[in-house]
Image (cartoon, helix red, strand yellow):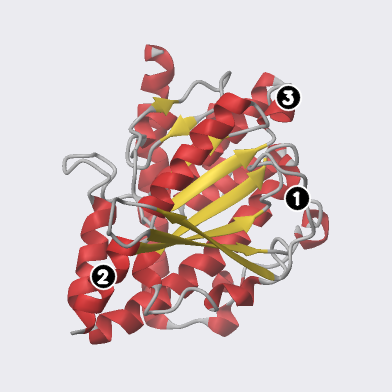
Amino acid sequence: SSGGEGDGLEIGEKSVFFIGSKNGVMDEPPKPTLALEYTYGRRARGHNIPKDIAHFWELGGGTSLLDLISIPITSDTLRTFSIVLVLDLSKPNDLWPTMENLLQATKSHIDKMIMKLGKTNSKAVSEMRQKIWSNMQKDHPDRELVDPFLIPLVIIGSKYDIFQDFDSEKRKVMCKTLRFVAHYYGASLMFTSKSEALLLKIRGVINQLAFGIDKSKSICVDQNKPLFITAGLDSLSQIGSPPVPDNDIGKLHARSPMELWKKVYERVFPPKSMNTLKDTKDPARDPQYAEREVDEMRTQKDQELEQYKRSSSKSWKQIELDS
């Protein structure tokens, strides 16, 4: 059966797909990356047992070659894949657009492949969902508020050695924002540099994705140290509020918590091309595109967001008082 073949793949073969900027994660001189690069590794499991194989893919060109994501990730290979998104902490103004474009394109493709796989093997899809949700405790207060990738996702902030010299307020905005995004998407988050100790940690994480060994459950959320947070161990209450003055949060017009964090981040680190787009009208509010059912759903989502902002600002004030 196709389920049996899939299970065989799951045991002996896994794939890790690097997107973003890989330069600085592995301790090797930067080399020009082809549009889509492939390599593989093997690990012996014991005498007369077939070796585990790990397939490593890397997407070159940052956000310019997003269509190529669909080549390695198909409905047949989906269950063996993990995604590693590498973000350059030394370029904070490029960080949000890079992260948003890559995550949206990847998630949209994965969702399509999940739907395709679901038509032929719904059991496999429900197993994938179960596996991802098992990272989060059953009674975790954020279960209804997050939307995890259905395949393992690791977000790596590279060039921590440069980032650690940033002004502490800027570091705070970047750390909190990345923690929110990682938590929302059910991802692990970790910072690295050329330091041997940090590289060893990252190698451990990649080995775990590639060969399923040494799953770490450690956590460091101190913004004065390299962040290291295993998926499912963070929470919105620990992350706290988007770092804006209290009276400003109500003035930010956002349609979702993710958009709220984006607006706060971009106030501190405006993306380079942002200035030309500032006055673009929101098509969701344009009467010529009105559609009753969609508009009703939009109104409901707006109300939910207002509620999120109100309840969050209460709990955020509480957190700030407690700390």
Q: How many labels does the image show?
A: 3
Horizontally, is 165 left or right of 151 in the view? Answer: right
Identify the residue shown where x is 17% and y is 40%.
139
Identify the residue shown where x is 28% and y is 53%.
47
Quadrant assignment, res 296: bottom left
Q: Distance between the residues labelled 2 and 3?
A: 47 Å
Horizontally, is 243 left or right of 94 in the view? Answer: left
- x and y percent of residue 74 in the render? 44, 78
Mark 2 and mark 1 lie on one chain; the one further toward the N terminus is: 2
Identify the residue shown where x is 44% and y is 18%.
320
Mark 3 and mark 1 in contact? Answer it, CB < 8 Å.
no
Residue receiving disc 1: 271
Horizontally, is 311 left or right of 154 in the view? Answer: left
Q: In this view, does 159 lie above or below 1?
A: above
Residue receiving disc 2: 8
The amino acid marked with disc number 2 is: Gly
At numbered mark 2, what does the secondary structure look like: helix, strand or loop? helix
